[in-house]
Amino acid sequence: MLLLKELPTAKSLEKFAARYPGTNVRAISDFVSLLRASADISQALDKLLAKHGLLQGRWWILVLLMRQDDLTSSPTDLAAKAGVTKASITGFIDGLEREGLVIRLPDPIDRRKYLIRLTAAGLQKLDETIPDYNSKVDALMSSLGEQERDEMLRSLKTLTANLELMR
Amino acid sequence: MLLLKELPTAKSLEKFAARYPGTNVRAISDFVSLLRASADISQALDKLLAKHGLLQGRWWILVLLMRQDDLTSSPTDLAAKAGVTKASITGFIDGLEREGLVIRLPDPIDRRKYLIRLTAAGLQKLDETIPDYNSKVDALMSSLGEQERDEMLRSLKTLTANLELMR
DNA sequence: TCAATATTGTTAGGCACCATAATATAAACA
DNA sequence: TGTTTATATTATGGTGCCTAACAATATTGA
């Protein structure tokens, strides 16, 4: 996601509106601000994870595995939960396996399948990363009061529920 | 940005908290929801732009050019405004120039420089895309009341102002 | 004036993240 | 049994970034 540093100025928005009559300048400006905030937050997470040698893609896979009682899942299941194709999961697993954070085990029941399991090293990586993640996320989110946070999330949920309007 | 479909359940958050005492479950849950909403919104923009044969990276470059009075800018300037390196800008320009939306002109004054100018085709592409963009963004943002929107953006601004807490 | 320094843009090379299509293997079904 | 379906991988490629090295040009200042 391109991190547009320069949000539109009032002047450039006016220019915009002049060429495209009926422009809702407020809506555009607010939307760009929203995207910009999103990008900033995501980038901050990238940096936090990078301190621990992780990247968002791999991080979420590890987190999905840790959610399982046996620390194990299948590529197909991970693909569904992560919202990407199975082919993409293969790539993530390759990287994680190369780093020893995960292993592929043949499924004893269905020989087409693999079980992807978090290794001890993988769990250790999480044990190293998560306390930092927890405390930083807590610190960040605490900059908003409970009610303010609720309202923000409610608003975001309203927006995402209406995303079909973008089609 | 990986679009984690499956937000943490109450149960998995409890498990999380059991292994990592002191976890602020609310903070984590809220943070993930926020990331998820961001990803959804960004993806919706991707789809809107894709209808017009554009992608976010190139889109923002075109928008930056359109903001200029003479529809012209330099790679260095674009890099600063877009928040990426000059080498990345070269790539964007290559793509846009290949599609005829932009041209590289030698700077008559400084022979190290190029002027990147929106072509007629580039402007036409914007004329085709922007009304759609405007109306869709307006529709989406209108799903929130004025005050609700203000509050949401204020909250996001507070968060981004506190991102150094993530370091 | 001219040598050192700074700036501009590109190239080369690389990594992460994603997709689609084709393939091989195995399971399930009828 | 034979066909369909499911699983995972490979191959290939696009987009969005980066750093490092480079060539060309401009600026500065002794």
Image (spheres, coloured by chain):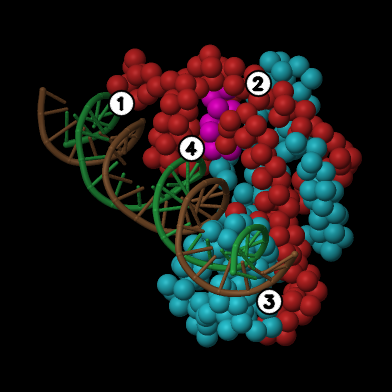
Chain colours: A cyan, B red, C brown, D green
Give the labeled residue for mark 1.
B112
Q: Secondary structure at mark 4?
A: helix
Q: Position of residue B159 (x, y in %)?
A: 70, 55
User: Does residue A152 appear left or right of residue B51 in this picture?
Assistant: right
Sequence-first disc among 1 and 4: 4
Sequence-first disc among 2 and 4: 4
Spatial CA distance of label 1 from label 4 is 18 Å
Residue visible at 58% across and 32% down in the picture: B54
Task: State the image quarter where residue B65 is shown.
Answer: top right
Discs 2, 4 touching: Cβ within 8 Å: no
Give the labeled residue for mark 4.
B80
Examine the rendering and report whether any part of residue A128 can be seen: no
Name the quarter where the N terminus of chain B is drawn. Answer: bottom right
Q: Nearer the viewer, residue B145 or A123?
A: A123
Q: Position of residue A49 (x, y in %)?
A: 54, 66
Give the labeled residue for mark 3.
A67
| Amino acid type at image mark 1 | Arg
Q: Secondary structure at mark 1?
A: loop
Q: Decide: few, some or many residues near mark 1? Use Cα within 10 Å; few <14, some 14-19, many ≥20.
A: few
Q: Decide: few, some or many residues near mark 2? Use Cα within 10 Å; few <14, some 14-19, many ≥20.
A: few
